[in-house]
Image (cartoon, rainbow, N blue to C red):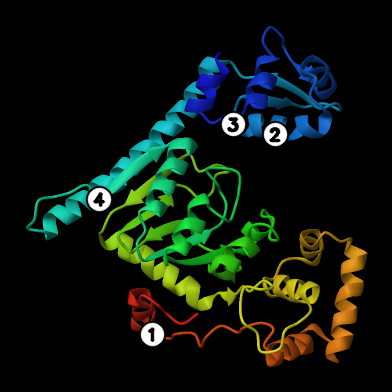
Amino acid sequence: MAGAELLDIIGLSEIDVAVYDAFAGTGSMTVAEIRQRTGVSEPRLLPVLRSLTEKGLLTGLPGPVATYSAVRPEIALEAMLRQKERELASARLVADRLRERYRATSGERPVDLIEVIHGNTLIADRADQLLRSAEQEVAFVNKPPYAQPPSVLHPAERDLLSRGVRFRGVYERSALELHDLTSDIEAGLSLGEEARVVTTAPLKMIVVDRRLGLVPLRSDRPEVGTALVIHPCALLDALSAVFAFLWQTGLPLHMPGSVEQADVAPSDDARLLALLTTGLPDRSIAKQLGMSYRTFQRRLRDLMTALGATTRFQAGLQVATRGWVTLPATQPTRAEDISEDADSPSPPP
């Protein structure tokens, strides 16, 4: 078995391949035996064994000691390849249905509405191409999975913002826990990016000038794997409407120096308050601030005392009154209100 071929076709990592290869010529092995044969530490090995078991490459055997046996490649890999074929067939079916619908409703020459892109490298390259083609606005929803290691500030963003292209980003809370907020989000906001935070988002997307969209085919996998480029059609309109709704319901995210504030808080306190508005767990906020959980709790108590607040709710009111954070605009209640926001080139932040 060639590791590169498995990586390309099935999406196994190099360590997955190494551990699976270790079973060649053996009947079954305990975790200790696998560790000795591969040289992989137990904390790193256990997630690999779980992953290989979920993929059907290994089988856990009953007994007092954790023991695994390998499923023969012609059985396990064939099942995985068939699953990939079903996913590709599903993507083609979606593309065919959209093409037929467009052909039935348009008197013009049919055009391809959807591009299917496979492989994280090609997806990342296509995303870069889409972003660099922007002339007016880039709207995006940021959440896992990622085609590349997570990074908020795309290399093209700095150049586009300097040319006056508007960047609006909706971040799912889970994405914030994967990013270095200090170096990534503050960098983008300081350049002019507008950001809001939602608890959950139905999918990740990039929509450029409302003429091209990019979405992953699946959102329930640890890697992107396959993505769709959406050209002008009803589906692209739907993506724009979803973004508009998320933007309206999200909480504005302002880091120190990213906005003009009526009454400026100390920079450390302003950063802490900005992270609190995202709804991140306290321990995640402490990690982002580079402090221990105990120090974070003490800093938060001191801040609440300075604000004259005994609860976080009271502290939130004080912070909003002082203009240290910005509350979202009144939410729309009609579908046409959401559409108007999507159509507007400069909706209110």
Query: Toward which corner of the image does residue 115 lie, by quadrant?
Result: top left
User: Which residue corresponds to mark 3?
Assistant: 55
Kindly tell me whether residue 89 is visible in this rendering. Answer: yes
User: Which residue corresponds to mark 2?
Assistant: 50
Q: Percent position (x, y) of residue 11?
A: 54, 31
Left-right relation of 273 to 209? right
Query: Toward which corner of the image does residue 160 lie, by quadrant?
Result: bottom left
Q: Amino acid at mark 2?
A: Arg
Left-right relation of 231 to 323? left
- In primary-sequence order, the first of circles 2 and 1 is 2
- In primary-sequence order, the first of circles 4 and 3 is 3
Q: Amino acid at mark 1?
A: Arg
User: Which residue corresponds to mark 4?
Assistant: 113
Q: Foreground: 19 or 188?
A: 188
Mark 4 to mark 3: distance in Å?
Answer: 33 Å
Q: Foreground: 339 or 195?
A: 195
Mark 1 to mark 3: distance in Å?
Answer: 45 Å
User: Which residue corresponds to mark 1?
Assistant: 334
- In primary-sequence order, the first of circles 3 and 2 is 2
